[in-house]
Image (cartoon, rainbow, N blue to C red):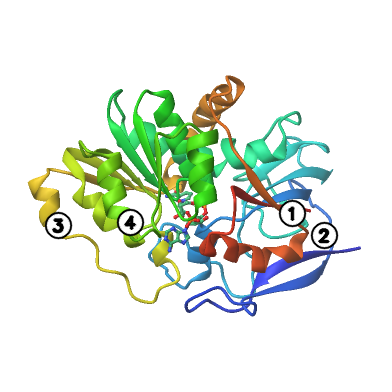
Amino acid sequence: MTYKAITLVKRPETELTDDLLKVIDFSKPTPTDGEMLIKLSHLSLDPAMRGWMSADEKSYIPPVKLGDVMRASGIGEVVESKNENFPIGTRVMGLMGLTEYALSDGKGLNKIPKELPADAILSVIALPGITAYHGVFEVLKPEKGQTLIVTAAAGSVGSLVGQMAKNLGLTVIGVAGSEEKCQWLTEELGFDYALNYKDSNFEEQLSNAAPNGIDLFFENTGGVAQGPIFNAMNPHGRIAVCGLIAEYNKTEASPGPSWIGIIKKRLTIQGFTMPDHFHRINEYGQALGEMLEKGELKYRTHVLEGLESAPKGLNLLFNGENKGKLIIAL
Ligand SMILES: NC(=O)c1ccc[n+]([C@@H]2O[C@H](COP(=O)([O-])OP(=O)(O)OC[C@H]3O[C@@H](n4cnc5c(N)ncnc54)[C@H](OP(=O)(O)O)[C@@H]3O)[C@@H](O)[C@H]2O)c1
């Protein structure tokens, strides 16, 4: 029996093109002692995959080797097992790649309850939720009454960040790239303001939404919104640098705001990546599960069908056409 997987055959220079990833047929492997075979049911497409395709050896995680199955996280079920910790029927989540089947010894995989829907796991309990949770509670450390702004606010991480801050009693401003997304933020998620960074009067809209300045900035994008937001920061403000998606397809970094503002306003700016905090996944997952159960977090998913949808699907994250967590159903 054969199955399909997607390998990385070429590294991107700028935008993601059709020739970088290739669908290949593999023969189904048989687990040896300590191994198990997992049938994937759902895959997650994430902006970080763009970085994993590049040759950068100095990033927080090594690049995917040319010819290897493209790294991606997903959910699956054990269908054959020679590992007593993972009997047949166990549901697992982890970095198993863009593939229909994966062979594993269990390292790096998390067991997940069967009753939780895959979209809730991938949209909230998995990377988007733990990233939002860590950035909000461990980096920004919000206090009631403060004003928080988040970019890519209608995306999977950003939408959770804003809701967590609203639930803590902050004034929340979301920045997104379309009117539809802005409307979703204010009408469905309860953000106080949603600003379209593509509007020519973005700066004016920002000063109207935050007449007393910004205390906390959850940065997901870089790009045109970054400078005006940086200039609106209050003294002793904090910036969590989670992502800079506007930069990922560029060959040269854009100039950022002048560092003089960091001194004058005594700002704290902290970058973070979740692999450093994976040891806290159970703790964060528990907290996120409770928030979901209480109805404190809403999410939406953008579901593509079939493994072959991955190469083109990834681009939706970069042109902003994804509406919510981008998932592939296999
Ligand atoms: N540090 C970590 O460990 C970690 C973990 C997870 C994610 N992240 C980062 O968090 C950010 C959000 O990730 P996500 O998974 O939640 O994706 P997402 O927000 O669901 O999707 C990406 C969104 O980015 C926006 N975007 C794309 N190009 C842009 C540009 N040039 N300028 C401004 N906005 C742009 C688009 O929304 P619009 O329509 O609003 O433009 C797009 O929908 C990414 O930068 C990602 O790399 C970091």
Q: Is mark 4 within 8 Å of ligand 1?
A: yes
Observer-nearest of 81 and 249:
249
Q: Earlier in the sequence, mark 4 or mark 2?
A: 2
Circle 1 residue: 103
Q: Residues under labels 4 and 2: Cα distance?
A: 48 Å
Pointers 2 and 1 in contact (C-beta within 8 Å): yes
Quadrant of res 208: top left
Mark 3 or mark 4, earlier in chain? 4
Q: Secondary structure at mark 4?
A: helix
* Label 3: element kind: loop
Which disc, if any, is residue 225?
A: 4
Viewer-side residue, 161 vs 51? 161
Using the rendered image of the protein, determine whether residue 154 is visible from the camera's viewpoint: no
Residue 276 visible (yes or no):
yes
| Horizontal relation, residue 6 to residue 221: left or right | right
Percent across and percent down for residue 216 are 28, 38
Q: CA distance from mark 3 to mark 4?
A: 17 Å
Residue 79 locus on image (x, y percent): 84, 45
Q: What residue did someone put label 2 on?
A: 29
Between 238 and 206, the residue placed more toward the observer is: 206
Give the labeled residue for mark 3.
Answer: 259
Quadrant housing residue 2: bottom right
Please state which of the two labelled residues, at mark 4 or mark 2, is closer to the viewer: 4
Nearer to us of marks 4 and 1 is 4
- SS under mark 2: loop
Callout 4: 10 Å neighbours few (<14), some, many (20+)? many
